[in-house]
Amino acid sequence: MQPLAPSIEMPSSSSNYECRVCAHSAHGVHFGVLSCRACAAFFRRSVVMEKKYTCRKANQGCRIDKTERYLCRLCRYKKCLQLGMTADNVQWNRDMISSTDRKRQSDDDGTDIDAYSDWSPGSKKSCLDGPPLYDLSKTLNKIHKTFMEFKIPEDDPVYQTMNTLGKMDWALRRHRKHHKIQDFRISNTVRLDQLVDMWGSEMTKVAEFMMHSEEFRHLSSEEKFSIFKLVWQISQRFEKLTMSLEIFGKRALEEKILITSNTTAIQMEHVNVDLSKITDYTSIELRNMFHPFCSRLYDDVARPLLDLDPSSIEISYMLCQIIWHIAGKTMQGDILAAGEKFIAKIADDLHQYYMKEYKMANYAGRLIKLMTVVNSLQRIHLDRLKIMELAKIFDIFKVKITDPCFFQD
């Protein structure tokens, strides 16, 4: 018997067939199983890049269908194997989706890539050295150590008298206390290894910040990591943006300046990030792909923040809302209950803050404006996730990370 072909396309009249993995319209028999392009590309990428997944619900029983095929990579991969997909049929150097198919392929929400038509793949050069590996094990160990060994500052009498929101604000201000405008230099070129170092530093800071929440501390280690992986990128992006506005003021908005570390900042419109090691696409193509999100970040988030001029307490409140809203909505169960309890506490604390500091009994209008900013950031974040999922399907970024679930965005 001849071995199964990696990919056998069906005629166009066969559109009524369903992918056995996710129930979307099938494209053909891929790796021995009738499947859509997306699931075939997912299986190929999992095998070629030797990806290691963890179950979102930890029970390896997640439903994989039209609406939820992206929610758990481990269960999706296991379903591929259970249905008979085999790594023996993977062609390791074959691009399964042609450049013509790229323009027609749709994501899970039915969003056609033509909606992002100003991203044009163009010509590609071959990568013969294989994807580079970025080992974040030291950073992950630091995060784990933070979760296991964190101690509240019992020697700080002021901290001990603070309410929940006050403690979160204390933690945020602690990370910002040494930042001054004269300490920053604007850099228009960033290397990938510099980005990885920045990510490692930011991940540790976010972990420390989250541990000042009593509700978060009482969760299991697995639950902490599950939340952290979901929210660290959006929370650090918001924190960096608000800090950029605090340091550079109106200039940050006009020149789209974003602080990236304790000493450096970039101009988002002009920065050149060298990603040649992990992609065959040009910087112009990648800029076209992500530029709309940069514009929205400054128009829908930075501009209203500049007008509101929020206090440190208000920034901390928004940051907590971002973290726990995403965590509760995605994880449910005990995490949702913990998040609701925490949000109720900081809502009461913010009320007391407005009454005591501003003598403001009617603050509903200001609170609505703050939450509008939070919701705008979350929409941008979700839209970026969709684009990154498309990038994974089409193998735009060729990189191996010790735990890729930490880089969903």
Image (spheres, helix red, strand yellow):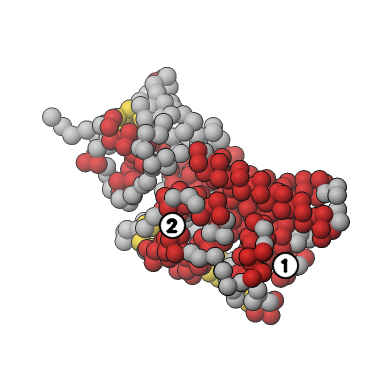
Q: Residue furthest bottom?
A: 182
How far is the residue under mark 1 from the one under mark 2?
A: 35 Å
Q: Count the numbered circles shown.
A: 2
Q: Is residue 3 above or below residue 230?
A: above
Q: Which residue bears the numbered disc 1?
A: 246
Name which quarter of the figure residue 174 lies in: bottom right
Residue 21 locus on image (x, y percent): 37, 30
From the viewer's perspective, is 390 left or right of 346? left
Q: Position of residue 409 (x, y in %)?
A: 52, 51
Nearest to the eye among marks 1 and 2: give it. Answer: 1
Does residue 107 show up?
A: yes
Q: Is residue 265 visible?
A: no
Location of the N terminus (image quadrant)? top left
Q: 130 or 375, which is in the foreground?
A: 375
Q: Is residue 316 left or right of residue 288?
A: right
Q: Residue at x 59, y 39 (%)?
A: 115
> Which of 147/385 is in front?
147
Q: What secondary structure is found at the residue carrying circle 2?
A: loop
Residue occupied by mark 2: 279
Residue type pointed to by label 1: Glu
Asked whether the beta carbons under mark 1 and mark 2 sit within 8 Å of each other, the answer is no
Measured as percent of width and height from the top left, residue 195 is found at: 50, 66
Q: Residue at x 76, y 67 (%)?
A: 249
Specify the label residue 58 is tagged with. Answer: none
Q: Residue at x 64, y 56 (%)?
A: 164
59 or 1, which lies in front? Answer: 59
